[in-house]
Image: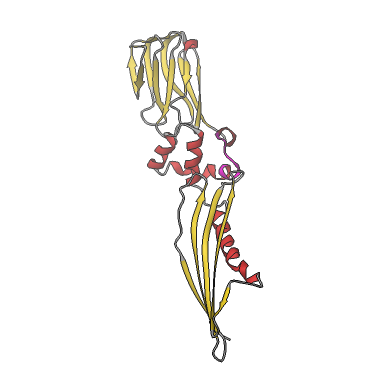
Amino acid sequence: MTVSGAMFDAIGSAQIASLAVTDNGVLGVTLGGSNDTALQVSGTASFDTGSKLAIKLSNVQSAEGDHVVVQAGTLAGVNNLTASTTLLPFLYKGSLSSNANQVIVSVARKDATELGLNRSEASGFAAVYAALVDDEDVEGIFLAISDQEQFRKQLGQMLPEHEGGTFENVTLGSRAMVRFLADPKGPFKDEGKWGYWVAQAGWGSSKSVGDTAGYDVGGWGISAGANTRPVSEISVHLSAISTARTATRAMATKSGPSSWNWQPTGA
């Protein structure tokens, strides 16, 4: 068999008489499953200058380790063969070695530093990786990721929302709405036997990505109330808070619904 100036995907095991990779040819190998590439060459397997071995993975459960992809009676020009990791998922790193009769591909998982993970991502990475073997769809998504940015976005979706943006938004809104109570000249309109007040507030905060995820939160709210004065004073307080945005880094912006709260108070 000759692979010349093109790419040939060798899937599963096969027995052939000879193998020649020439003219910058690429031999594609798939690892990590029952169809691991394993070429048994009874004669000579030769590799000209510019020959490449393109590495792909089919699952994560058996991806790591040493894989013999070519077993030949004689190897020629094996030093011309280089590994192409373009098709290798970003999650892994691969290397190429050989002995007298074998071409061996070694696959290992990248550590947190190589993946560019921050502290919180690194702490959850092992649990996420262990869960991949239980869900083929999610496993396939991670095996298709080829760059760091996409990998971190996908990993972030599997981690709990712990960066604090939700709590920050709730407390900012509450503090902003009650702050006007400290004003001795609040927005109160006296109509004699009754009076009313209306106040609005806006807030916002953000945090960049560091050891934990970042967030960008903000909102707008309105608070209103009325007082009547017959014999005693009775007031009814009506407030509404509408969240304009609550978003974590690398996640879509979402709006929260308005909430109404009636608070009757007696004299």
Tell whether 191 sits left or right of 138: right
Provide residue 250's location: percent of width, then percent of height: 49, 44
For this orientation, the residue located farthest to the bottom is 231
Point 58% across, 57% down: residue: 168
Point 33% across, 17% down: residue: 15
Q: In which quarter of the image is the C terminus?
A: bottom right
Residue 119 part of the magenta-drawn span: yes
Name the one closer to the observer, 111 or 40.
111
Residue 265 visible? The answer is no
Residue 150 part of the magenta-drawn span: no
Provide residue 116's location: percent of width, then percent of height: 57, 35
Name the one closer to the observer, 199 or 249.
199
Provide residue 6's location: percent of width, then percent of height: 36, 15
Judge whether 112 appears above or below 127 on screen: above
Point 47% across, 22% down: residue: 105
Tell whether 128 sits left or right of 119: left
Q: Quadrant of the N terminus?
A: top left
Name the one closer to the observer, 99 or 208.
208
For this orientation, the residue located farthest to the front is 191
Point 45% across, 53% down: residue: 254
| Colouring chosen for the image of the structure | secondary structure
Provide residue 252's location: percent of width, then percent of height: 45, 48
The span shown in magenta is 115-121
Determine which quarter of the picture holds residue 144.
top left
Judge whether 131 appears above or below 72 on screen: below
